[in-house]
Amino acid sequence: MVVMTGGQAVVEVLRAEGLKYVFGIPGTTTVPIVDALAKYPDMTYILGLNESVVVGMAHGYAQATGRPSFVNIHAMIGTAHSLGNLINAYKDGSPVVLNPCVPDNRFLGDDCFLDARDAVETVQQFTKWSWLAQGTDTLPQVFRRAFKVAAAPPTGPTFVATPTNILADKADVTLYQAERYHVTAGPRGDPDKIRAAAEVLAKSKSPIIVAGRGVAKSGAVPELVKLAELLGAAVFAEPHNILLNFPTDHPQYLGGLERSSPLVSVADVVLGVGCKMFTEFIYIPAPVVPETAKIIHVNVDPWEIGKAYPADIGIIADAKLAARDLHEALASSMTREQLSGCKERAKAVKKINDQMQAEAEEFAKKDFDAKPIKGWRLVKDMKAVASDAIIVSEGMSSAGYLAALYDFHKPGSYYATSGSCMGWASSAALGVKLANPDRPVIAFVGDGCFSMSFQSLWTAARYNIPAVIMVLDNYEYMAIKAALFAYKGYAAEKKLPIGVDLGNPNVDYAKLSESLGVHGVKVESPEEIKPALKEALSSGRPELLDVILDPRETGYRRPRLQ
């Protein structure tokens, strides 16, 4: 045991976890932790201008490293500001440890300045575990638990509120090596269920695989590729996909799962690996997959299995271990006739893939040199210049161009959020870049989303985090405008799209960027895309590209506004 302040004890836990960064916005209640951090030059405090931004950075960093990140903020006010990106972190299963420093606990219940009735209650539905620390001597134990729970499958955010007086007080504390309390490995599937699943898959005639975030989180992409190739099955990304769970240039990959996707309506077996079944947006009575199909659902989280879709075989397991076990069970049990059928099925899937790729390439030729810039022209030029870049996507109406026209070859090349809070990508991209200093990082972010988190540019400039923020600027909340016109009500009839126009005045994001210390360039013509992106990626500093897109295009293969 050793005598130290509570703030020092918290920082010692962070150092034991191997953390290089603390993301935060300080306040008077955070002083004991900020003071303790000053003693440790091996840790960098990454300051932001908005709590949602610093949580977004921590979220991106946690996604990119697969390890917990830490956010220190001020009282209930900071907690309230952080909620949007905390929701995103929860929906995405990102292991973010959020630590608001709250008023002296001797004021508890007195309705003092900065107080809240119950800070823990506020965030409970968006965290795996939430706690109000009680004493200085218990702080190492509490924060050990917060990191353990955040990192244990299924991963997700945790919350520890620390009264400022117990951070300032001294006590005898016990510190442990972090490895002694980590629980990061997922379980292996029940062998009987693995065998049963393999038997169903071996006999299937038209199976499909739905790859979810759990595949990338457990490093299971190579195992799932082997399983898919053995089975000859079409592979789809789960709806609202947030990570690269299968190489998008693989001949058996047919894109995101939708009711209208090829081979879905005739599927006799659906194998979901590490996915949710399913995150939907608009209510449609008919199920995403056929009711007659047998469902095999692999997920490390028991809550997901049978949550909305019944599972004929539910396997609680780490995706990597389950994919490996299923491959071994199939390889050792399939007949020569079944293996031959799998090869023929793979050829049929490739034929569909080839046709989809040809159609996408043909689509992308239309108005290729037009001005204003088409979204597909932008993505094609991005692919030509930055095929090795990590893309952090929050293009609400433009992400479809990425999915159709950009190839993602390896895990860790694509990040998005399935949460509902806009203003994520430009901050998350900074966290992703901190985790990947040797790879180019591009935030692909709509102007509506960027308007909610442009403060991240200041942080990028202050710490020289050389990510490229690409603003997809059509002066609209385009996803909402398209939905409003598709609704075919009074607003569409009279062409009065209330509340979706971001012009008048048009925000000059390049000038805004300059005011926050980041070099900004406005890209208005197609021929400017490649040179601007090349220069931005090679500059060694944060850059913003304000790309002016055609305001009548609503997304890949979606109706053009008239």
Image (cartoon, rainbow, N blue to C red):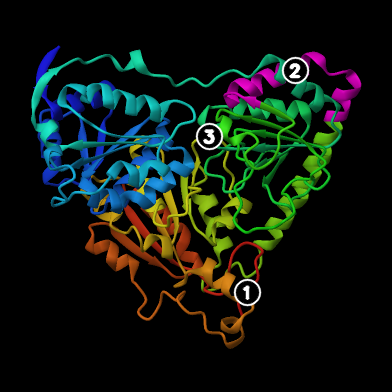
Q: Secondary structure at mark 3?
A: loop
* Gap between marks 3 and 2 measured at Cα: 28 Å
Q: Residue furthest front?
A: 109
Q: Residues within 10 Å of mark 3 (few under 14, many from 20)?
A: many
Q: Is residue 313 left or right of residue 52?
A: right
**Residue 250, how many percent across, how many down?**
68, 38
Q: Is residue 108 left or right of residue 291?
A: left
Q: Residue at x 77, y 46 (%)?
A: 264
The residue labelled by disc 2 is: 195
Residue 534, above or below 477: above
Amino acid type indicated by mark 3: Pro
Q: Which mark is residue 11?
A: none
Q: Nearer the viewer, mark 1 or mark 3?
A: 1
- Which contiguous range is marked in magenta? 315-342
x, y percent for residue 128: 41, 35
Q: Main secondary structure of the magenta part?
A: helix
Where is 456 relative to 232, above or below?
below
- First in sequence: mark 1 or mark 2? 2
Q: What amino acid is at disc 1?
A: Tyr
Q: Amino acid at mark 2?
A: Arg
Q: Residues within 10 Å of mark 2 (few under 14, many from 20)?
A: some
Residue named by callout 3: 411
